[in-house]
Amino acid sequence: MRVAIIGQGYVGLTIAVGAAGAGHSVIGFDVNPALVDQLNAGKSHIEGITDNDLGSFISSGTYAASAEASALDGSDVIVIAVPTPLDSQRNPDLSYVHAAAELIQKKVKSPALIVNESTSYPGTLRNEIAAHITGVDHLYASSPERVDPGNTQWGTKNTPRLIGGMTSAAVAKAKEFYGSFCDSIIEVSSPEVAEAAKIFENTFRQVNIALVNEFAQIADALGISGREVLDAAATKPYGFMAFNPGPGVGGHCIPVDPSYLAHVANQVGVPATFIKRANEVNLAMPAYVVKRVIAGNDGSIEGKKVVVVGVSYKSNVADTRETPAAAVIDLLREQGATVTWHDDLVVSWRGETSSPIAGADIALVVTKHDGVDLAAINACGYVFDCTGSIAGVDGI
Ligand SMILES: NC(=O)c1ccc[n+]([C@@H]2O[C@H](COP(=O)([O-])OP(=O)(O)OC[C@H]3O[C@@H](n4cnc5c(N)ncnc54)[C@H](O)[C@@H]3O)[C@@H](O)[C@H]2O)c1
C-alpha cells in the first residue's frame, strides 16, 4: 500500500518503520523541515529505531520523509500521529489534530483510509477529524498508539492493536493494513471505544501511580519501608498489580491523557474525581522529595551543592517532556542549594548542560539510566534515591 504518515515523532516514525518493514511504500510527512532532512539523511531521533534500519528503508525506496504536503495525495492509507498536548489551562489542545485534518481537506483529493493514532478523547475521529474533511469519500478508523519508547519487550509488532472504524469498510481496510505488521488486531465496535480504551489505560496507570506515591508517604511516616510493603503485597498471585512510587509522572502520556478523559467527563456532567486527585498527588511529589532531602540534611540545604542525577522522565530515554526533575530542581534552588544535574542521555536541557556527579554534597537520583556511575553517586555525602534501586540510602 502507499502509506503517508502525518507526524514523524515517536509514534509516527515507529509506525513508518513498521509499515516500511512490511513492504509498504511509506512517506513520513512532518512540518519540521530540519527533522525531515535528518530522517532523509538516515538519522533516527528515537530510541528503538537504529540509523541502520532507517538507512536500509531509505535506500530500498520503501521510506522517504517529506515536508511537502502534496506528497499525501494518492495514498491508500493516511495515518495521523501528531501531538495532543494540554493548553495552559490543562485543557485538551487539538490544534495539531485540526491542522492535520485541514491538510487532508486541502491536499488529498483521492479517497484513502484515514487513521488517527494520536491519543485523544472519544469522539475525536468523528467530530474533530472526519467532520472537518468534506468532498472526498474517505474511510475513517481510530487505532490509538500504545508504543512505550525504550521498551524492548513490547513493540509495534507484538503489542495488540485496537481498531475501531466508522464503517465496516474502514475496519476491513485498517485490519488489512495493521495486520501486515502487527501480530494481533482487536476490533472494537466504534472509534469511540478505541479512543476511550487508550485514555483509560493511561488513566489507570496515573491513578495507581498516585496511589503508591501516597502510600509511600504513609509508610515513611509509619517508619516502615514502602517498597518492602509493595514487594510483599506483590507476592499475592491474584488481585494485585505492582506500581512503583517515584518523584512524579512525566512524558507525553501519563500526565496528559487523563486530563483528556476528565475534559469529556466534565462535558457530560460526570466529575472525574480520581483523575483530579491523582494529578494533585503526582504533581506534589517533587515537593515531597525536596522535603525529605531537607529532612535528611538536618533541616537545611542552603549553600549545599546538589547534583540531580537523571533528568529525563524515565530510565534509558532522553525524553524530558513533563519530567518531574524540572520541579525538583526549581524547588531545590528555592531552598538556596546550588544545583547542577547529570544525564548522559539528555546532555543539554533548559539552557544548561549535564555536569559531573563528583564533587556534590548531595546526589538526588530522579531517574537511573543503565551505566550511570553508582560509585560517584555513593561518594556524595548524602544520597536520596527516587528509583528504589540503590541499596542503603534514603529514598522513596
Ligand atoms: N510518545 C509516546 O510514547 C506515545 C505513546 C502512545 C501515544 N502517543 C500519542 O501519539 C501522538 C504523537 O505523539 P509523539 O510522541 O509521536 O509526538 P512527537 O512530538 O514525538 O511527534 C509529533 C511530530 O508531529 C509533527 N507535527 C506537528 N504538527 C504537524 C502537522 N500538522 N503535520 C505534520 N507533522 C506535524 C511534529 O513536528 C513532530 O515531529 C500524541 O497524541 C501522543 O499522545 C505517544
Image: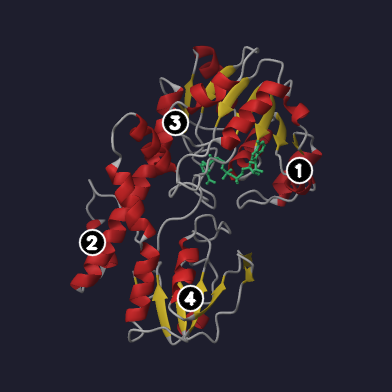
Apparent side of residue 12 relative to residue 26 in the rendered image (left or right): left
Q: Position of residue 223 (x, y in %)?
A: 20, 74
Q: Is mark 2 within 8 Å of ligand 1?
A: no
Pointer 1 local density, CA inside 10 Å: few below 14, some 14–19, many at least 20? some
Please report the residue visible at 48 percent of the width from the left and 26 percent of the height from the top.
163
Question: The C terminus appears in which quarter of the rendering?
Answer: bottom left
Helix, strand, or loop for circle 3?
helix
Apparent side of residue 388 relative to residue 133 in the rendered image (left or right): left
Pointer 2 local density, CA inside 10 Å: few below 14, some 14–19, many at least 20? few
Kind of residue indicated by mark 4: Arg
Apparent side of residue 197 relative to residue 215 in the rendered image (left or right): right
The reply to whether the C-beta atoms of the residues labelled 2 and 1 are less than 8 Å apart is no
Label 1 or label 3, whichever comes before in sequence order: 1
Q: CA distance from mark 2 to mark 3?
A: 35 Å
Q: Is mark 1 within 8 Å of ligand 1?
A: no
Please report the residue visible at 60 percent of the width from the left and 77 percent of the height from the top.
355
Nearer the observer: mark 2 or 3; the answer is 3
Residue closest to the eye, 89 or 70: 89
Nearer the observer: mark 4 or 3; the answer is 4
Kind of residue indicated by mark 1: Ser
Question: The N terminus appears in which quarter of the rendering?
Answer: top right
Q: CA distance from mark 1 to mark 4?
A: 47 Å
Helix, strand, or loop for circle 1?
helix
| Residue ID for mark 2 | 232
| Residue ID for mark 3 | 195
Above or below — where is 121 with respect to 235?
Answer: above
Kind of residue indicated by mark 2: Ala
In the figure, residue 388 lies in which quadrant?
bottom left
Above or below — where is 252 with respect to 146?
Answer: below
Colouring scheme applied when the structure was drawn: secondary structure
Residue 56: give its label: 1
Nearer the observer: mark 1 or 4; the answer is 4
